[in-house]
Image (cartoon, grey):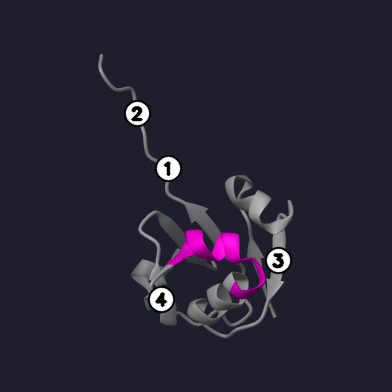
Amino acid sequence: MTRVRIPPTLRAEVGGAREIVVEGSTVAEILEDLAARYPALGSQLLRDGELGPFVNVYVGGEDIRTLDGLDTRVDGKPVILLPAMAGGAGGR
């Protein structure tokens, strides 16, 4: 089992939970478990079986993009979902 921390911006999709216990040995398996249990969350995380463009996933504090991507093994390490934030002060 692996604990996935859910950021405040995504908690509505999981009934307000800060953390979810999931099954899976890789990031892909974990995200698939989350998507099956919480379809609204799944549609924000995955697009055609790939990680959504504005989603960051960390395993044990490491960005999975610098590891093995969705094939990154979790080995019981905490997983953090972090939507990328964009914006700025436009039109000055």
Q: Secondary structure at mark 2?
A: loop
Q: Amino acid at mark 2?
A: Gly
Q: Name the residue tied to disc 2.
A: 88
Image marks 4 and 1: residues in contact by CB distance under 8 Å: no
Residue drawn at x 38%, y 73% as measured from the top left: 48
Distance CA(mark 4)–CA(mark 1): 22 Å
Image marks 3 and 2: residues in contact by CB distance under 8 Å: no
User: x and y percent of residue 58 in the render?
Assistant: 49, 64
Q: Amino acid at mark 4?
A: Gly
Mark 3 or mark 2: which comes first in sequence?
3
Distance CA(mark 2)–CA(mark 1): 10 Å
**Residue 14 in sight from this viewpoint:** yes
Q: Name the residue tied to disc 3.
A: 20
In the drawing, does residue 74 fall left or right of residue 62?
right
Mark 4 or mark 1: which comes first in sequence?
4
Distance CA(mark 3)–CA(mark 4): 21 Å
